[in-house]
Amino acid sequence: MVHFVGAGPGAFDLITVRGARLLSEADLIIYAGSLVNPELLKYAKAGCEIHDSAYLTLEEVLSLMKKAEKAGQNTVRLHTGDTSLYSAMREQIDELIKEGIPYDIVSGVSSFSAAAAALEAEYTLPEVTQTVIISRMAGRTPVPEKESMKNLSKIGSTMVIFLSSSLIPQLVSELLEGGAYSRVTPAAIVYKASWPEERVFRCTLDTLEKTAKENGIRKTALIIVGNFMDSLYERSKLYDPSFTTEFRKASHES
Ligand code: SAH
């Protein structure tokens, strides 16, 4: 059986309990070495076969999985963060289905969650925004035309931008073209969220490029944009004394 496991954002103890157990039981681990913290391999049992997929093609990954399956072994395919974002998991699953190899998926803590914790922030603030857009700039890998940053930025929601720290000048000009953000809109760079070397840089769209340059940010970073980092917001209805919920009656009318 093949278990696709979200490794979490980096910290050794931010993998799920289930993910850590599966790692400790695996006969074969194929991990995305360009991003997964190698410390996580300490969960592996003695004698476990371990491969870094940064050096492998899809065909080679699949051939390792097939060989393990034939030998009745357990495989963990360890992807960074959560498996649902930019993991290239789907193409592996489709091949496993063709081969009749059973698999399951164990979700992980995405780097976008770890970045919010690093910022000590809530992406969805009442009366500011209730929407988070996760996207990336087109680079060597294309993005569908209608999902250009210019289009996505028209809403003015919170934006969490993956895989784009080497494309900041173009990113900023597209974000401004959308019309909902301005040069003073708060922005942040979160580098290696939850790793020991985590760094958080708060800036604005105007100073984003300079901030990245001065701090040598080129990869393993998220760029985060939105007014949720400003100080203005409304308090929540959920905990408002004048608001009745399913569990609590309002103590007074507002
Ligand atoms: N599945 C992963 C994303 C993989 S794409 C997840 O859920 O987080 C790889 C990109 O994710 C990187 O280029 C970077 O933009 C971001 N990333 C991954 N780990 C990160 C971390 N610990 N801190 C900041 N960004 C990270």
Image: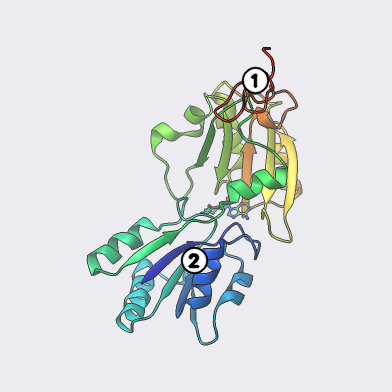
Up the image or down, 123 lies above or below 60; here it is: above
Asked which secondary structure carries label 1, the reply is loop
Amino acid type, callout 2 = Leu
Residue 26 image position (x, y, % from top left): 47, 77
- Residue at 35% x, 65% y is 103
Tell me if 1 is positioned left or right of 249 in this view.
left
Residue 87 appearing in the image: yes
Between 77 and 73, which is closer to the camera in this rendering? 73
Quadrant placement of the N terminus? bottom left
State the residue position of label 2.
78
- Residue at 52% x, 24% y is 154
Between 195 and 55, which is closer to the camera in this rendering? 195
Residue 197 image position (x, y, % from top left): 74, 59
Mark 1 in CB contact with mark 2 (< 8 angstroms): no
Residue 165 appearing in the image: no
Quadrant placement of the C terminus? top right
Residue 83 image position (x, y, % from top left): 46, 56
Residue 115 image position (x, y, % from top left): 65, 47
Q: Is mark 1 within 8 Å of ligand 1?
A: no
Q: CA distance from mark 1 to mark 2?
A: 47 Å
Q: Which residue lies most toward the bottom here?
A: 47
Between 155 and 217, which is closer to the camera in this rendering? 155
Amino acid type, callout 1 = Ala
Mark 2 crowd level (few <14, some 14–19, many ≥20, 10 Å Cα): many
- Residue at 38% x, 80% y is 73
Q: Earlier in the sequence, mark 1 or mark 2?
A: 2
Q: Quadrant of residue 67?
A: bottom left
- Residue at 46% x, 34% y is 148
Asked which secondary structure carries label 2, the reply is strand
State the residue position of label 1.
250
Q: Closer to us: mark 1 or mark 2?
A: 1
